[in-house]
């Protein structure tokens, strides 16, 4: 029989797994039992929805047996089983992202101790087995198949005579060496401990023949007999009393059930009675999965009805801005026979989704208030999603989210909430100032920043593309409007200063209009600036589309002709201004050249490109030559 080769990715992972001197190798049992439990979930669901597949709940079981003589450990389930194609597809490739992430970490040479955090699946059994044989019969087929592999050299698939539906996994343990001993996995005592530790909450009985000692009838003597025992308590974690569940148990469940590899930033475990009753166990992650911001990421909560698994990713239970939440809900009120399509329309689902949203929001607010450090860690991963949420649906969710978003600010290099900003605004300040840019350093160099800092105003740094769009949806916070420091009137001046500017504007009317004429189509106005201190010029835009938005929109073909109206502002206190005043009466053509240079400089400072860089370079060179 021809051997099939593992897919390359899988081969690499297997090598790593087989050869890892990994202290936590015991997790293989957790992984195999969790696969068996999933297969039983699927069988149970099928039994409820398909009359030809009925099976009594009592017959859904997991069984462990030991064959000491042949050094074998056997794990059998009466689950959904696998067809030969499924055996090939599921066990010949890496099935899920957890494995890939795990492999990456191993290759990066990360601490092997963290391996226990990954859902590494079926392959982990090669840490203790020199050969794995899988006999499986799918519910949907009459023929059973056998998959077999020694891990290093491909696998074979052949016919099997297994006659009941389900899967039997036979692990032939590795031989003991001077340093490694695998015998413990042939001891009921060890296996019992492991089941208790990792799989106690599995909702199907995990049975095993266990040696027990009894007192003989009518005598003081003891005898040892083999007895069939159910090892796990079968109470799912989410049905247990909150105070009886340790943080470690919650976290372990999170990682093994949802293929997570971080610690949750917050765990929400609650039950609700009312219009609709349900239990929920929700996790707010700390770190974003590598594919979170791509369409590959599948959001959703696991859905159970009366303890029966219904579906893996019920995405209607989570609003898109909380799509990072992982977890499950178990409701007694949903109809078990409900089809998956109808489920989406279900009124009860909507009610549940609403209350879940409230809980998550409450959880996040609580985290922000009571564990700022954790919250900021969470925000670094998922803040972008929250800010998109503010903007999404024309700002429909801004009330929910506005207190959850953070920005870095010019006061300290720290995150602030909008509330914190509002609370420490200056007495007469009525605007929330922000500045857009690629980095804090770049924003600090903006000519406009200087005066704001001088006047003691706090400026929020908008570093993500979405930030300004989000404030566009918000419009204001607690009655204070948002204001870009590069747009419109900043309202920084005292009455006196305002009058001063007016006067200068009047005196230099001709100069300003000559400059405007020089720049004709490119700017909508040339103005005396009140926002500059030591810099000569800056480019600002009027209310409406900002220069920053123009940059972002221009990346999108549909937005490429949306332009901000540009205004060139000149600092009347800068020496260049005096030069310009003089040129107006003496040398009009040099005035024109200077105007064009200043405009191009303003564009460059803003991070925008200039229309004719060659001309600009030549002009500067001319000036430099004249100096000598
Ligand atoms: P994961 O369980 O994380 O998807 P595994 O490598 O552990 O990854 O398993 C791959 C796939 O093989 C599973 O998704 C499942 O479809 C199938 N599988 C594994 N064990 C069983 C089993 N006992 N019964 C039925 N299918 C199984």
Image: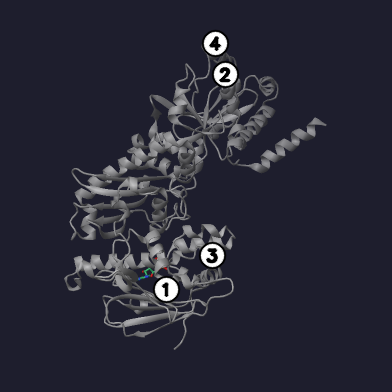
Q: Where does the N terminus fall, quadrant-wise?
A: bottom left
Q: Check disc 4 and report the residue beneath it.
A: 496
Q: Residue at x 38, y 58 (%)?
A: 257
Which structural element holds mark 4?
helix
Mark 1 within 8 Å of ligand 1, using the beta carbon: yes
- Mark 4, Cα crowd under 10 Å, few <14 / some 14-19 / many 20+, is few
Tell whether label 3 touches label 4 (CB within 8 Å).
Answer: no
Q: Check disc 3 and report the residue beneath it.
A: 22
- Mark 3, Cα crowd under 10 Å, few <14 / some 14-19 / many 20+, is some
| Picture layout, residue 133 above or below residue 519 | below
Q: Position of residue 123 (x, y in %)?
A: 46, 70
Q: Is residue 528 visible?
A: no
Which structural element holds mark 3?
loop
Q: Residue at x 44, y 71 (%)?
A: 185
Mark 4 or mark 1, earlier in chain:
1
Tell whether label 1 touches label 2 (CB within 8 Å).
Answer: no
Residue 312, image quadrant: bottom left
| Mark seen at residue 509 | 2
Disc 4 to disc 3, how far (Cα)? 75 Å
Disc 2 to disc 1, how far (Cα)? 79 Å
Q: Position of residue 288 (x, y in %)?
A: 46, 50
Tell whether label 1 touches label 3 (CB within 8 Å).
Answer: no
Disc 4 to disc 2, how far (Cα)? 20 Å
Q: Nearer the viewer, mark 4 or mark 1?
A: 1
Disc 4 to disc 1, how far (Cα)? 79 Å
Mark 4 or mark 3, earlier in chain:
3
Q: Check disc 1 and report the residue beneath it.
A: 91
- Give the left or right position of residue 384, taking residue 81 as reference: right
């Amino acid at each position: 029989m021809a051997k099939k080769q593992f897919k390359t990715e899988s081969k690499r992972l297997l090598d790593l797994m087989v050869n890892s001197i990994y202290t936590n190798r015991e997790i293989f049992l957790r992984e195999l039992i969790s696969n068996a439990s999933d297969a039983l979930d699927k069988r149970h669901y099928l039994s409820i929805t398909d009359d030809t597949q009925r099976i009594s709940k009592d017959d859904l079981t997991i069984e462990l047996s030991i064959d000491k003589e042949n050094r074998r450990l056997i794990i059998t389930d009466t689950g959904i089983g696998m067809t030969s194609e499924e055996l090939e597809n599921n066990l010949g490739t890496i099935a899920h992202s957890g494995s890939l992430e795990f492999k990456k970490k191993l290759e990066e040479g990360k601490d092997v101790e963290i391996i226990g955090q990954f859902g590494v699946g079926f392959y982990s059994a090669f840490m203790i087995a020199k050969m794995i044989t899988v006999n499986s019969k799918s519910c949907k087929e009459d023929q059973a198949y056998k998959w077999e592999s020694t891990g290093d050299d491909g696998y074979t698939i052949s016919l099997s005579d297994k006659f009941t539906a389900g899967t039997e996994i036979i692990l032939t343990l590795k031989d003991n060496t001077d340093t490694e001993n695998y015998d413990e996995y042939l001891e009921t005592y060890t296996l019992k401990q492991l089941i208790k530790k990792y799989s106690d909450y599995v909702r199907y009985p995990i049975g095993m023949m266990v040696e027990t000692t009894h007192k003989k009838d009518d005598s003081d003597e003891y005898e040892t007999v083999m007895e069939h025992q159910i090892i796990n308590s079968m109470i799912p974690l989410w049905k247990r009393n909150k105070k009886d569940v340790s943080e470690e148990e919650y976290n372990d469940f999170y990682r093994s059930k949802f293929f997570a590899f971080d610690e949750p930033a917050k765990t929400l475990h609650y039950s609700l009675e009312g219009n609709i009753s349900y239990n929920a166990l929700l996790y707010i992650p700390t770190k974003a999965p590598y594919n979170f911001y791509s369409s590959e990421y599948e959001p959703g909560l696991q859905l159970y009805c009366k303890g029966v698994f219904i579906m893996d990713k019920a995405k209607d239970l989570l609003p898109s801005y909380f799509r990072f939440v992982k977890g499950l809900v178990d409701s007694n009120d949903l109809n078990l026979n409900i089809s998956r399509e109808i489920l989406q329309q279900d009124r009860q689902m909507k009610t549940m989704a609403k209350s879940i949203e409230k809980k998550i929001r409450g959880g996040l607010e609580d985290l922000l208030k009571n564990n700022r450090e954790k919250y900021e860690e969470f925000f670094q991963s998922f803040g972008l999603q929250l800010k998109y949420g503010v903007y999404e649906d024309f700002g429909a969710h801004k009330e929910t989210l506005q207190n959850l978003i953070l920005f870095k600010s010019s006061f300290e290099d720290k995150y602030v909430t909008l509330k914190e900003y509002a609370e420490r605004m200056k007495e007469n300040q009525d605007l929330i100032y922000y500045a857009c840019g690629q980095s804090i350093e770049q924003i600090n160099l903006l000519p406009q920043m200087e005066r704001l800092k001088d006047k003691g105003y706090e400026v929020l740094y908008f570093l993500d593309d979405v930030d300004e769009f989000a404030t566009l949806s918000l419009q204001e916070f607690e009655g204070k409007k948002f204001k870009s420091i590069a747009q419109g009137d900043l309202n920084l001046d005292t009455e006196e200063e305002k009058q001063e500017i007016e006067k200068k504007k009047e005196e230099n009317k001709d100069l300003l209009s000559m400059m405007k004429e020089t720049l004709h189509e490119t700017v909508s106005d040339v103005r005396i600036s009140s926002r500059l201190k030591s810099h000569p010029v800056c480019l600002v835009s009027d209310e409406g589309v900002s220069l920053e938005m123009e940059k972002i929109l221009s990346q999108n073909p549909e937005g490429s002709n949306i332009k901000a109206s540009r205004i060139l502002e000149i600092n009347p206190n800068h020496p260049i201004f005096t030069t310009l005043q003089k040129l107006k009466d003496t040398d009009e053509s040099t005035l024109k050249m200077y105007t064009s240079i200043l405009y191009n400089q303003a564009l460059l400072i803003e991070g925008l490109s200039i229309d004719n860089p060659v001309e600009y370079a030549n002009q500067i060179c001319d000036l430099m030559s004249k100096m000598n």
